[in-house]
Image (cartoon, helix red, strand yellow):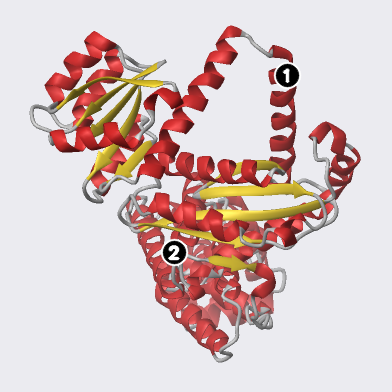
Amino acid sequence: MLKVLIADDEQLICSMIIKMIPWDEMGLTVAGTADNGLETLALIREKHPDIVITDIRMPGIDGLEMIRQAMEIAPDTEFVIISGYKNFEYAHQALTMGVRHYLLKPIDRTELHDVLGRIIRSRSENEEKREGSEELAARKESYKKNARLHFLNSILQETSMEVMESSERETEDLAFNNNRYLAFFVKADWTGEDEIAPGILDILQSVIEREEQEWACEYVNSRVRSGVISVINYPEGAKEAHPEDMETLYTRCRKEMDKFAGYSVTIGIGTEKGRISEVRESIGEATCAVKCRIRRGVGRLIFYDQLRYDKAENIFTADRKRGNARAVESLDAEAIKSDLQELREMLHENPRYSPLCEFELIESFRNVILEVWENNQIEEKVRNSFTLDTENLMDRSITEAQMTQQFEDTVDRYFRMIIAERRRNGQAPVRAAKAYLAAHFMDNPTLEEVAEAVSMSPSYMSTLFKKELGIGFSEYLIQLRCEEAKRLMRETTDPMSLIAEKVGYQDAKYFSRIFRKTVGIKPSEYRKLYT
């Protein structure tokens, strides 16, 4: 029998827990009780319990510190934390320590029974594996799980249709035995600034798998950034016979999330498909349904086939893209914000617009920024960081306004960072371009040639010249040639036609017009004045 230790500073709570559970029937025995952290540690050393049910706050040392020390003494012990209130700080620390069972007072008899049952089954399964029992069956099941997980991950990573069709021919290997498929996405959101604790996804995946086992269907689950995507395989008509299954799953997921302050859960459900090659479509639908929470609100079930939004026309036109690119070239964050707000207003003119268009807008702006940055040789690590930050804000935003504001803040922050970096580097790019022109001005170099020589885009080179020198590229090149022509007039007796050729002009008359326009007098008059 598995030994259980109960720890709470209220002896009444310990007695109540003892009366709640049919210990013998479950194969458990209460090895002792304690009313403070130090006594609990002493009993763990003495009794070596398999399970410890403990309050999170106790005299002596609190429950978290007790657990930390106990894990060093008995690393295989399972801990069930109980608490009289939601306290995210404590719960978060417990999750990071590896504790997966967290109950709120007043303790629910059924919930405690369920937690203990899961621990018993888990330990039993682990014991069987250690003893090598049913080794062949375990290997076979492991193969199936790995094959199915590989199948789902292939879809999530945009595997080609050729591979998808090949997968469909191998349904036996994937152990998909039925002819109906459905994808759903269980998405966790929370109000904190850090990443979602991995333990939260452990809890959600555990709830999902328990439900799927009750549905008696084939399934495969894969974690994504902040949730779990699941594909289930079942016989035709099975889901119609149990329409409340998703409601039950949502209720149980929400109940677990309610234990942790600031967390909510939303489930997006795709539509039923009849072929493996269509599973990707169902996953896409489930993902779209979850995205729609930015308008419908978090903490709900969202069925893709029940969404009634109008698909907006493409308002991010080629002209808009060019305008955005110019704003990025000049690092004008205010212009980006203004254009984004204007496009959002155009979207919102239709009260039935799809919230998915909000995501499309952010992605379009992001892609223009990344394209310009790549052309302008912005460091890859900066581009990758910006991409990751943008993906995170789209994943974590729970309202349209929040997503737009966070994107604008992100653009502003990166633009300021790049501007500061350029200031630190001084005028190095312009100096390099000026040096190149000084060596090649007689060869009639183009803006494109100079930009390529100094690893810049032509548009950025043009912008930088005006910003740093106050004149454009062409005007600078003319001034450079005229200065060299003046030197040759002062220091040589070369005829004007040869001087014009030496500074890059094949037509002496054209050179004369350019020189007079730039210097203010004809070349012949200049020579008379300075020779």
Which tag, 1 or 2, sits closer to the chain's start?
Answer: 1
200 lies above or below 342: above
Can you identify the residue that label 1 sits on? 137
Asked whether, in this view, residue 424 is left or right of residue 38, the answer is right
**286 lies above or below 64:** below
Which is nearer the eye, 511 or 46?
46
Circles 1 and 2: CB atoms closer than 8 Å: no
- Label 1, secondary structure: give it: helix
Type of amino acid under label 1: Ala
Name the residue carrying label 2.
Answer: 397
Please tell me how many numbered marks the rendered image carries: 2
Left or right of residue 28: residue 156? right
**Residue 31 location (% of width, % of height):** 27, 17
Indicate the position of residue 136 as horizontal and vertical percent values.
74, 14
**184 lies left or right of 400:** right
| Label 2: element kind | loop
What residue is drawn where x is 53% and y is 42%?
Answer: 205
**Vertical placement of 461 versus 129: above or below?**
below
Q: Which residue does the image show at 34% across and 40% down from the upper left? A: 102
Image point (75%, 32%), residue name: 147
Task: State which quadrant residue 119 falls in.
Answer: top left
Query: Horizontally, is 465 left or right of 161 in the view?
Result: left
Q: Residue at x 12, y 27 (%)?
A: 36
Residues under labels 1 and 2: Cα distance?
44 Å
Closer to us: mark 1 or mark 2?
1
Quadrant into which the N terminus falls: top left
**Kind of residue sitting beneath label 2:** Ser
Q: Nearer the viewer, residue 347 or 433?
A: 347
